[in-house]
Structure formats: structure tokens, C-alpha cells
Amino acid sequence: MITVSENAKQHALNLMKNENRPEGTFIRVGVEGGGCSGLSYKLEFDTEKRDGDQVFEDKGIKITVDKKSFLYLIGTELDYTGGLNGKGFVFNNPNASRTCGCGESFSV
């Protein structure tokens, strides 16, 4: 399962409202090759499910992930931080054995 922190929930809802996203919009997360640690996170809004998608709902936020990416993201929490090192959505991924300094890529 992929979960959402309360902070991430609030920021996602605010973004969807501010961007006038249609009813049924969800967060699509994924993994692709690249980044300084080997794998990079993907995060975007979407409205269309694809074959093989895994769908989760936590705190009223729907999250969709493709089957391949899910293997790397099992147990991950989507969070939002506003600290001194920058602000934005972050992935708290228990499967990552190494992450880069910016938190945008990882390896397993």
C-alpha cells in the first residue's frame, strides 16, 4: 500500500483546487530509470486509469501506481515538507537502500 501524510493530503487538495482539476482526479506515482542514484520518482495528477494500475486510497486521496513501479514503492508514504532545504512532495520509501541528497532519486 502507498499512504499519504496529513500534510501531503492538504497540499494535494489545495493544488487540485487551485489548478481547477476535474472531479475524479487522482495522484499518479511511479518510478523510472535515471537520477544520481539510479531510479527517479514520478508524481503527477491524472484522471485516467491504465491497464495494470494499482489503486489505493488514504485519507480521501486516491493514488495510482503502475504494477512495475509498485514493486519499488510498497509501503511508501507520500509526504510534504516545507523545511529549509526546500519544499515539496517527498517519498518516504522503506525499500530505498540509498537516496540522493535532494531525495528525488534512490536505489534498492
Image (cartoon, grey):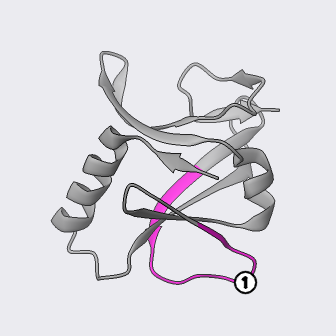
Q: Position of residue 30 (x, y in %)?
A: 64, 56
Position above or below: 41 against 38: below
Q: Quadrant of the C terminus?
A: top right
Q: Nearer the viewer, residue 20 or 37?
A: 20
Q: Position of residue 27 (x, y in %)?
A: 46, 63
State the residue lying farthest toward the top.
84
Q: Nearer the viewer, residue 83 or 62?
A: 62
Q: How many marks?
A: 1
Q: Quadrant of residue 61?
A: bottom left
The amino acid on which the numbered mark 1 sits, given as a three-letter code, is: Asp
Query: Residue shown at 32%/54% (left/top)?
Result: 12
- With 58 as the anchor, is 35 left or right in this view? right
Q: Position of residue 14 (x, y in %)?
A: 21, 56
Q: Is residue 52 magenta?
A: yes
* Residue wearing tag 1: 51
Q: Nearer the viewer, residue 53 or 83?
A: 53
State the residue lying farthest toward the front.
59
Q: Quadrant of residue 53?
A: bottom right
| Residue numbers of the magenta segment | 42-55
Q: Position of residue 51 (x, y in %)?
A: 72, 84
Query: Residue shown at 27%/48% (left/top)?
Result: 11
Q: Nearer the viewer, residue 27 or 87?
A: 27
Q: Quadrant of residue 45?
A: bottom left
Query: Residue shown at 41%/40% (left/top)?
Result: 5
Query: Residue shown at 47%/61% (left/top)?
Result: 44
Position above or below: 77 against 49: above
**Mark 1 residue element:** loop
Q: Is residue 20 magenta?
A: no
